[in-house]
Amino acid sequence: MPRTVREKSNTGVYHAILRGINRQTIFEDEEDATKFVETLGECRKKSEFRLYAYCLMGNHAHFLVKEGREDLGVTVKRVRASYVYWYNRKYGRCGHLFQDRYKSEPVEDDKYFLAVLRYIHQNPVKAGIVKELVDYPWSSYREYLNNGRLVETDFALGLFSDDRLKAVEAFKRFHEIEGQENCLDIDEKRKPTDAEAIELIRRICQVANCKEVQKLDKAQRSRYFRLLADEGLSARQISRITGIGRWVILNALEN
């Protein structure tokens, strides 16, 4: 099936999502998240895009961005290539890390701009990672409170008030309200519990015991891994249950 044409923004502003291939985790630890944020800063200087918000969420990341001197697609490729090169060297792996086609939606007016801004920042709370937005270290929320350097905060705060102190207070109050807008999302399936995963592995791989998957033919096993990933199982979960190395599973998913 041919890909649909990506909808262009008249303002040049987009809500974009990068996602790990087969729902793979792309930020394993704090060093990974820190490196990705640094990569954003480096690529911003080269591409001259404006970053209004971001949030890193384990196996995906959200951005509110305005195109600079190059198309958004070129900018996304630049960010991904730089981070993947570093990530693969760190973990001794090769191949793709991100889903090939990033997702994006145009942001055409100030009202929706603020809705997306709030939606991005509220992701960690809605996911149950933290109770308060300010407690999450890998989003741009704190930058709006503390004159951040990576994110351009003046435009969004200016939509609340010309007085920065008043704007920040209004910004915080605005984020305390749960947004009801239907913003772009990753359509993530609910992650199966280990008990559900065990049953899926037994049924799909046609084995009585999950450890028996180790004895299957390599090509057949790889096909089963892809089917399990489509059901929402992560490489880490499959590895934990079957005893097969995580990188073996990831290599099978990428090929």
Image: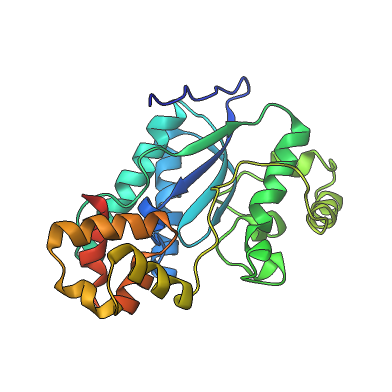
* Position of residue 97 in the picture relative to residue 62 (left or right): left
Above or below, comparing residue 199 to residue 168 in the picture: below
Residue 89, image x and y in percent?
Answer: 21, 61
Colouring of the image: rainbow
* Position of residue 71 in the picture relative to residue 228 (left or right): right
The residue lying at 70 percent from left, 64 percent from top is 133
Above or below, comparing residue 109 to residue 176 in the picture: above
Question: Taking the image as drawn, is residue 186 in sight?
Answer: yes
The residue lying at 51 percent from left, 44 percent from top is 17
Q: How many marks?
A: 0
- Quarter of the image where the N terminus is located: top left
Question: Taking the image as drawn, is residue 29 in sight?
Answer: no
Residue 105 lies in what quarter of the image?
top right
Above or below, comparing residue 107 to residue 54 in the picture: above
Pick whichever, 112 or 206, lies toward us. 206
Pick whichever, 252 or 117, lies toward us. 252
Pick whichever, 119 or 4, lies toward us. 4
Residue 92, image x and y in percent?
Answer: 19, 65
Residue 86 lies in what quarter of the image?
bottom left
The residue lying at 29 percent from left, 80 percent from top is 209
Residue 107, image x and y in percent?
Answer: 65, 31
Residue 106 lies in what quarter of the image?
top right
The residue lying at 33 percent from left, 62 percent from top is 204
Residue 57, image x and y in percent?
Answer: 52, 60
